[in-house]
Amino acid sequence: MAHCIHYGVCGGCVSDDPDAPDKRALLREALARAGYGDAAVAPLARVPWHSRRRVDLAARRHGAEISLGLHRARSPEVADMRECALLRPELLGLLPPLRALLRGLQAFRRAAELAANWLDNGADILLRLDAPLTPPDRARLVEFAKAQAIPRLSVSLAGGEAEPIAILATPVLRFAGVAVSPPPGAFLQACPEGETAITAAILAGLPEMRPRSRIVELYSGCGTFTFPLAQIARVEAYEAGAAAAAAAERAARGAGLAGRVSVKRRDLRRQPLLPRELRGAAAVVLDPPFAGSGPQIHHLAAAQIPSIVYVSCNPAALAREAAVLRQAGYTLASATPIDQFLYSENVESVLNFTKS
């Protein structure tokens, strides 16, 4: 029996075997393509079922019927989600009332999207709708938030800025004890267990730090790794997203870390950090987007930083960029695979590169 009634229809899972594909082997193959054929790869760390706290769903209207879920395999159609072996029960339980809400919204005509993050104090929901909100729509959204005890419910129209419609409480997520209020629809690590494993591998891969040591963090988001890193050194964090960078900066000030954590907004694809800007860093930690870091990896390799910890969810991009580091003389000290995307072809990896 399959792990989910939607398996084979929903495009979320590509396998019904938790051990296929072999994700440790995927990482080994990527490292071999980069020239690290003899790399020692740690055992695979795997997250439990029903732990995913972040989900992006699609919604379609078919007359009076609403489909809400992931896209069908190789299709623009939506598989109406009734169960999921991966999603947190709290988020799964919101789907029936969300269908009822969407059915009555005039601002939802044909197609919509939903981004939901489960935070420390409940669900943070962002609806992307295809028509302007009406006054009755706004009233329905507020009532829905109250009925479901949702701290914040926001709406975005035609790809525009997110507008909070109901804020019943400040949405909060803590990283190393620091309270962060992430922007609507913020990128988070898929589950807390995966985040914990990635953070532990990052910290284990760093050399010994002194209180005044400087760590440069690239693609820092709203502070997932920034604040754990700040416990061992000064952190200079760079993030392209204005809302995410602002959230991390507010959190740093609120925690009294303004002198220890600096957050700078910068699009590293268009304006990568140059070697002279990286000079003097004890380490660089980067968690680039799926496609990789682009031109930044070449400037990073040229900077000759003694320690680079690279977090990746894409073996193809990892192979390409690890090859750049190998050509610059970096050795691979450790490689840790983490499976926080069960039944998929994705594998999270934490790589520790060192330079003599």
Image (tube, rainbow, N blue to C red):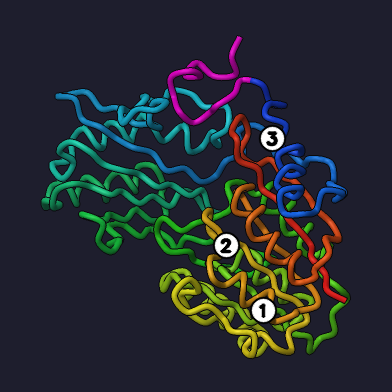
What residue is shown with label 3? 48
Secondary structure beneath disc 2? loop
Question: Would you say the residues marked 3 and 1 are in contact, meaning their CB atoms lie under 8 Å apart?
Answer: no
Q: Is residue 40 above or below residue 253?
A: above
Q: In the image, residue 193 lies at what x, y percent?
A: 69, 46
- Give the main secondary structure of the magenta stretch: loop
User: 299 and 148: which one is in front?
Assistant: 299
| Identity, as a three-letter code, of the amino acid under mark 3 | Pro
Residue 206, position in %: x, y? 82, 69
Q: Name the residue under label 2.
A: 288
Which of disc 1 and disc 2 is earlier in sequence?
Answer: 1
Residue 256 in view: no
For image coordinates 70% across by 88% down, the residue present is 279
Q: Give the range drawn in magenta.
A: 1-16
Q: Quadrant of residue 321?
A: bottom right
Q: Which amino acid does label 1 sit on?
A: Val
| Label 2 or label 3, whichever comes before in sequence order | 3
Which residue is denoted by mark 1 in the rendering? 216
Q: Which quarter of the image is occupied by the N terminus?
A: top right
Amino acid at circle 2 = Pro
Q: Is residue 230 visible?
A: yes
Query: Closer to the camera: disc 3 or disc 1?
Result: 1
